[in-house]
Image (cartoon, coloured by chain):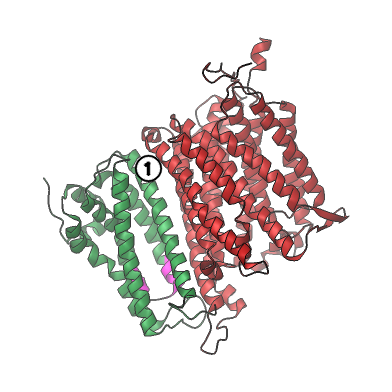
Chain colours: A green, B red
């Protein structure tokens, strides 16, 4: 029986991810429905937490004094963060759907967006740590969360996209390659923007 | 009978090289773990010169690249060139010479580094007597390899041999040109080049050592062992040939990206940057070729734990070959250079790509050479997760450390003064270095498990004699 996605899946996927994966495998919602009922609520969290944290306390990168940024720069950085997250989610979902035929997986774009959202959800929730903008604390919280997200990626693909676990493992590894590339691109783009004068004041 | 023994592959030398490779992997990674502990607790060198960071660090890099890496490359090149040429090794005694002479160079070279003899050129630290010895052994390696190809019974030269061949020729060229020096004493020489020229030659060598040894050589490994694992041909042979020539052409120009904002001409920096970006195309062509080859062989994952290593190595190969060109962009490099991001980048390649594909290959070769099942699939699976966790933790810790450093080095206040001192910045890195130490221990633990697993698989066994099969008449060399 097919069904529409409900916003309460946010809670379910945190408490019982395997049941949530099974539920997702049944949905037939369109891409926009999934995005507005599920993804959007989560994707605004990291930039919002980061904006509040950085504006009030400034980033502590390890040195004694926090790095304070001008409010205009901060807004620009937060907006960039949101846009990059949206781009990351959608591009990963499209790439996942593009890979689907190779790995015998379902080609429903809504399912791919929902799956990627569910994989990223622990990170979105854990981004509450941005309210305490200390790089080390963020790293200590986000690295274990990222490993949990990776586990969800490997577990979720075969169930949600209806493909054998071995093919799912290959597809997850291919997506991992893309996600690593996306993560490192984020670093590179950030540095290029700082060099161009957007963000912290650097002597370059 | 005589005819039969003449047709038997020489695999004993392959087994010995694998054993040496695993030994150096453990020893050099242990040195790496100790070094990362020194960055957290600087006093654990106990005032001993040979334990200082400056001496132990080249031991770590040389041990990994030349001990672990080159021994693995020699082992896999000797194994695969016989099987792709349908003929035993040419000059097998010379192959044994390569095997033992190389280990002697790594051992004595390592000790000389600990004793403080160094040229101070990164990845080319060994002094002139070792440079001459390396050149001799390397030429002998080439004679065995190309001699075997010349004796081949089938006409086409398989793609893995092109990569191994490029490794041998280009590394010989780089090593000899970069090591040109005027000896002063037995333990000291001065480079033939001076100033900026010396730096350019050094990074022409340094980057192409990464390119043709750590990338090209290991791609030879990939192109032979991945299809063997998957039991199907490479997805697109044509793409592999195109990728080879594009790779060989574009890699050789990329070295100057190590010298951005230095006293070399700006156009040379720009050329290095442009060729580095172009390099992404052949690198990813190979990654896609590998991923597509394995994508049709998914059933093999049920029974073959080693294939997982190769699948994952492709993911990290994709990451490292994207990250490199990106870091070569001047606007990124100005922040990333001299930070720990570079160390993270090197290790996403060395741990994620080089070590993983070597592990996958050893898990494939050793049971076949020993003629029995792998001692423990369970240990191999545990090793897989340890290797993945160690690599991820390592590169993420270094990403975070690198970005922080980049920001802190360059932060200026409203007056244009630097906001933070070097010492304070380094002191604030301790937590990341602690994370990296944990990552290193996890990765090393996996390598030790593999060593034990392979030792138990090989124990008491001699290599199974394998005869060269008759060549298919359609591809056979006409005599």
Identify the image quadrant of residue B440. bottom right
- For the point 56% across and 35% down, which residue is it? B160
Taking the view exactly as shown, the residue that stands out farthest to the right is B185
The picture places residue A186, in percent across and down from the top left corner, at 42, 64
Tell me the quarter of the image containing the C terminus of chain B. Answer: top right
Q: Look at the picture and state if B61 lies above or below B286.
A: below
Query: Was residue A183 drawn as part of the magenta stretch in this picture?
Result: no
Say left or right for B375 vs A76: right
Taking the view exactly as shown, the residue that stands out farthest to the bottom is B415
Compare residues B111 and A202 and report the one nearer the observer: A202
The mark total stands at 1
Identify the image quadrant of residue A124. bottom left
Tell me the quarter of the image containing the N terminus of chain B. Answer: top right
- Report in which chain the residue with disc 1 lies: A
Q: Which residue is mark 1?
A: A170
- For the point 72% across and 40% down, which residue is it? B138
- Any part of residue B360 in sight: no
The magenta-colored residue range is: A127-140
Compare residues A198 and B62 and report the one nearer the observer: A198
The picture places residue B119, in percent across and down from the top left corner, at 77, 58
Say left or right for B82 vs B381: right
Query: Could you tell me which secondary element the residue under label 1 belongs to?
Result: helix
- For the point 63% across and 64% down, which residue is it? B259
Identify the image quadrant of residue A158. top left
């Amino acid at each position: 029986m097919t069904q529409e996605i409900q916003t309460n899946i946010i809670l379910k996927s945190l408490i019982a991810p395997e049941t949530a994966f099974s539920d997702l495998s049944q949905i037939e919602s369109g891409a926009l429905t999934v995005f507005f009922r599920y993804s959007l609520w989560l994707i605004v969290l990291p930039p919002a937490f980061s904006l509040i944290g950085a504006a009030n306390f400034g980033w502590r990168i390890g040195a004694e004094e926090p790095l304070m940024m001008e409010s205009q720069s901060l807004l620009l950085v937060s907006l960039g963060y949101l846009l990059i997250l949206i781009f990351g989610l959608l591009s990963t979902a499209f790439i996942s759907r593009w890979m689907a035929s190779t790995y015998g997986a379902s080609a429903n774009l809504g399912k791919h967006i929902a799956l990627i959202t569910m994989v990223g959800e622990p990170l979105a929730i854990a981004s509450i740590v941005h309210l305490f903008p200390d790089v080390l604390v963020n790293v200590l919280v986000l690295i274990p969360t990222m490993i949990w997200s990776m586990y969800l990626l490997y577990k979720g693909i075969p169930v949600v996209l209806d493909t054998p676990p071995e093919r799912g493992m290959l597809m997850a590894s291919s997506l991992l390659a893309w996600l690593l590339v996306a993560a490192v691109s984020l670093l590179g783009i950030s540095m290029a923007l700082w060099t161009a004068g957007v963000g912290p004041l650097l002597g370059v | 009978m005589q005819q039969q023994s003449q047709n038997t592959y020489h695999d004993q030398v392959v087994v010995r090289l694998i054993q040496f490779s695993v030994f150096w992997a453990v020893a050099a990674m242990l040195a790496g773990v100790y070094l990362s502990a020194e960055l957290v607790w600087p006093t654990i060198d106990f005032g001993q010169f040979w334990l200082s960071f400056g001496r132990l660090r080249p031991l770590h890099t040389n041990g990994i690249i030349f001990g672990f890496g080159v021994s693995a490359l020699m082992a896999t090149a000797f194994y695969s060139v016989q099987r792709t040429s349908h003929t035993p090794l040419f000059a097998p005694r010379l192959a044994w010479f390569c095997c033992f002479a190389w280990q002697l160079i790594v051992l004595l070279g390592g000790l000389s580094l600990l004793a403080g003899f160094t040229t101070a050129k990164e990845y080319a630290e060994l002094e002139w007597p070792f440079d001459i010895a390396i050149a001799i052994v390397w030429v002998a390696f080439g004679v065995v390899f190309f001699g075997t190809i010349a004796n081949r019974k089938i006409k086409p030269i398989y793609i893995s041999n092109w990569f191994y061949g490029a490794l041998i020729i280009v590394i010989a060229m780089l090593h000899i040109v970069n090591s040109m020096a005027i000896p002063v004493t037995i333990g000291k020489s001065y480079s033939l080049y001076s100033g900026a020229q010396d730096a350019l030659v050094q990074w022409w060598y340094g980057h192409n050592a990464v390119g043709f040894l750590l990338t090209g050589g290991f791609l030879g490994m990939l192109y032979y062992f991945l299809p063997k694992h998957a039991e199907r041909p490479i997805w697109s042979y044509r793409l592999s040939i195109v990728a080879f020539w594009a790779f060989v052409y574009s890699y050789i120009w990329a070295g100057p990206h190590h010298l951005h904002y230095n006293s070399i001409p700006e156009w040379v920096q720009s050329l290095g940057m442009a060729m580095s970006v172009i390099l992404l195309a052949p690198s990813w062509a190979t990654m896609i070729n590998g991923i597509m080859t394995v994508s049709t062989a998914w059933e093999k994952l049920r029974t073959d734990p080693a294939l997982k290593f190769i699948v994952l190595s492709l993911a990290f190969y994709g990451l490292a070959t994207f990250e490199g060109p990106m870091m070569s962009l001047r606007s990124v490099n100005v922040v990333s250079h001299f930070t720990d991001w570079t160390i993270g980048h090197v290790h996403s390649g060395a741990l994620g790509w080089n070590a993983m594909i070597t592990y996958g290959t050893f898990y494939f070769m050793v049971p076949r050479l020993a003629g029995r099942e792998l001692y423990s699939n369970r240990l191999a699976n545990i090793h897989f997760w340890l290797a993945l966790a160690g690599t991820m933790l390592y590169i993420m810790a270094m990403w975070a450390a690198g970005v922080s450093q980049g920001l802190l080095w360059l932060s200026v206040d409203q007056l244009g003064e630097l906001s933070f001192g070097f010492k304070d910045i380094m002191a604030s890195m301790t937590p990341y270095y602690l994370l990296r130490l944990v990552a290193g221990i996890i990765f090393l633990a996996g390598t030790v498990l593999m060593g034990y697993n392979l030792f138990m698989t090989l124990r008491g066994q001699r290599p199974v004699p394998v005869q060269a099969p008759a060549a298919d008449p359609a591809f056979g060399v006409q005599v």
